[in-house]
Every structure is written in C-alpha cells, then in structure tokens.
Image (cartoon, rainbow, N blue to C red):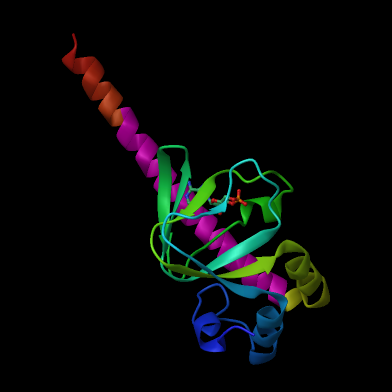
C-alpha cells in the first residue's frame, strides 16, 4: 500500500475522510519514473488517473508543450470524464512518483460513495477551470501579438 502521508497531502484527496482515503489508497498503486519516460501517450486508451506525488511532468504533443505539472497536481482526468483517447502525451521531466488510480476503481468508488464523487469532482472542475483560464490568457496574448504584428507591417 502506498505511503498514506504522500497521498493524504495531495490536494485532490485532502478533503476526504480517513476511511475514504484508505479506500482510495487501496484502489491504486504508486509508480516511479526516471526522467524522460512517457507515462501516457497521445491517442492511446486512457484507463487511469495519475496524482503527482513528487517530481515534474510535461504535457505535450511532439515538440509542442502545453504545460508542466508538478507535485500536488494530476493528469488523466480528461479520458475519465469522457471515454476518449489520451489528448496529449505526458513525459517525466525528472525522477517522478505518481499514484495511479485506475478509472474502473475510481468509478466503483464514486458509485459506492457519492460523497467521494462530489469531493473529487469539485477539485477536478477547479483544476480544469484554472487550465481554461490559463489557455484564455495565452490566447489573448497571441491575439495581442497578432494585432501588433499586423500593425507593424502596414
Ligand atoms: P488525458 O487526455 O486523459 O491524458 C493526457 C492528459 O494531459 C489529459 O488527460 C490532461 O490531464 C492533461 N492535459 C491535456 N491538456 C492539458 C493542458 N493544456 N494543460 C495541462 N494538462 C493538460
């Protein structure tokens, strides 16, 4: 069983009761990755959610990096919410420890205990909102740059 102190500090799980946390920890496994290992691959079938306990990963498609994620963050939720292939590749940037929670185990837990569902889903929605805010602000910067370039060429 994974070290519960690493898990219980993770923001996705911090509002669970001790019993709920115990169930989550039994449902998954800790995995370790060396730098530069592909953890999930764009287009592959997504069957697990990953909580980052330690280290850092890059989310990318080929050379285009969408972002980096570190301890306390998570990835793999998009193919949980919707049964779609992985939307991006995720690669470890340094030695990284993850908690891998299979989607099936998570869905079973959510069905058994609706409180777990609301606690986890609120955290997932908060994270997705934050990512959307960041994407919007990047798009605004790109628009500003495009306007500036168009202006400087006349
Ligand atoms: P999933 O599609 O299951 O697998 C790849 C994961 O990368 C995806 O879930 C998200 O968790 C993560 N991801 C995709 N796009 C971004 C982004 N723009 N910023 C941060 N994480 C992302």
- Choose top left, top right, bottom left or bottom right for residue 117: bottom right
Dominant secondary structure of the magenta stretch?
Answer: helix
Q: Is residue 23 left or right of residue 98?
A: right
6 relative to 61, above or below: below
Q: Quadrant of residue 137?
A: top left
Image quarter of the N terminus: bottom right
Image mark count:
0
Is residue 109 rendered magenta in the image? no
Task: Report the residue at 51% width, 77% height from top.
Answer: 10
Residue 83's x, y, as percent?
74, 48
Q: Residue furthest top?
A: 154
Tell me residue 77's x, y (percent): 62, 57
Of residues 144 and 77, the one nearer the viewer is 77
Describe residue 63's horizontal placement relative to residue 22 as left or right. left
At x 41% / y 37%, what residue is drawn?
A: 63
For the C terminus, the image quarter is top left
Q: Position of residue 35 (x, y in %)?
A: 41, 59
Residue 89 placed where, x, y %? 53, 46
Residue drawn at the location 69% of the way across and 56% of the way down: 80
Magenta-colored span: 116-143
Please check the rendered image and state whether residue 125 is part of the magenta-colored stretch, yes or no: yes
Residue farthest to the bottom?
18
| 97 vs 67, nearest the viewer | 97
């Amino acid at each position: 069983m994974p070290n519960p102190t690493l898990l219980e500090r993770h923001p996705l799980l911090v509002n669970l009761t001790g019993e709920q946390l115990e169930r989550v920890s039994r449902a998954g496994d800790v995995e370790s990755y060396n730098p530069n290992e592909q953890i999930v691959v764009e287009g592959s079938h997504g069957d697990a959610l990953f909580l980052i306990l330690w280290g850092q990963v890059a989310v990318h498609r080929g050379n285009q990096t969408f972002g980096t994620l570190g301890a306390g963050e998570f990835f793999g939720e998009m193919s949980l919410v919707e049964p779609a292939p992985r939307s991006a590749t995720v690669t470890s940037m340094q030695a990284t420890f993850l908690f891998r929670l299979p989607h099936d185990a998570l869905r079973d837990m959510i069905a058994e205990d609706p409180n777990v569902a609301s606690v986890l889903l609120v955290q997932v929605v908060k994270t997705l909102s934050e990512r959307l805010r960041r994407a919007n602000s990047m798009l605004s910067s790109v628009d500003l740059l495009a306007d500036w370039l168009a202006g400087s060429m006349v």
